Image (cartoon, rainbow, N blue to C red):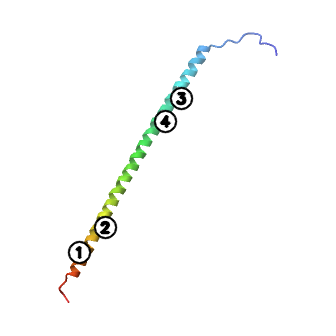
Amino acid sequence: MTPPAEQVTVDAQQYIDQLRAQLVEAWGEVQAQLALARTESTVRAAREAEKDRQLTVSREAAADKDREIAELKATIASLQGSSTRP
């Protein structure tokens, strides 16, 4: 292969500056995506925590109703047992 007739010169600083600008832009985009992902994760965790809290409240309310029903049944049974009616 024969060398070119004239030398080709490259402005390395211009190329480096271009690469640096691309890197800064890419870094900014990645940081924005990371911030968005963290926010989405936080929101998702908050929603899950709220669902868990609501489930706990519902279970506690159901347990309270079950206790109330059991107490009423016990009261009915004791009233039926102590009835003076024939």
Q: Are marks 1 and 4 in contact (CB under 8 Å)?
A: no
Identity, as a three-letter code, of the amino acid under mark 1: Thr
Identity, as a three-letter code, of the amino acid under mark 2: Asp
Q: Find residue 4 and report its horizontal and vertical position in percent.
A: 77, 12
Judge depth for marks 2 and 1 and give the one in front.
1
SS for callout 3: helix
First reached walking from the N terminus: tag 3 or tag 2: 3
SS for callout 4: helix
First reached walking from the N terminus: tag 1 or tag 3: 3
Residue occupied by mark 3: 26
Residue 17, quarter of picture? top right
Say which mark, if any, is on residue 75: 1
Measured in 3D between alpha carbons, the distance from the residue under mark 2 to the one under mark 1, in whole angstroms, is: 14 Å
Is residue 73 found left or right of 27 in the rendered image? left
First reached walking from the N terminus: tag 2 or tag 1: 2
Measured in 3D between alpha carbons, the distance from the residue under mark 4 to the one under mark 2, in whole angstroms, is: 49 Å
Residue 64, quarter of picture? bottom left
Residue occupied by mark 2: 66
Which class describes the residues within 10 Å of circle 3: few (<14), some (14-19), or many (20+)? few
Residue occupied by mark 4: 33
Residue ranking furthest to the top: 6
Measured in 3D between alpha carbons, the distance from the residue under mark 3 to the one under mark 4, in whole angstroms, is: 11 Å
Is residue 10 found left or right of 46 in the rendered image? right
Quarter in which the N terminus is drawn: top right
Identity, as a three-letter code, of the amino acid under mark 4: Gln
Which class describes the residues within 10 Å of circle 4: few (<14), some (14-19), or many (20+)? few
First reached walking from the N terminus: tag 3 or tag 4: 3
Measured in 3D between alpha carbons, the distance from the residue under mark 1 to the one under mark 3, in whole angstroms, is: 73 Å
Q: Residue at x 49, y 35 (%)?
A: 33
Residue 66, quarter of picture? bottom left
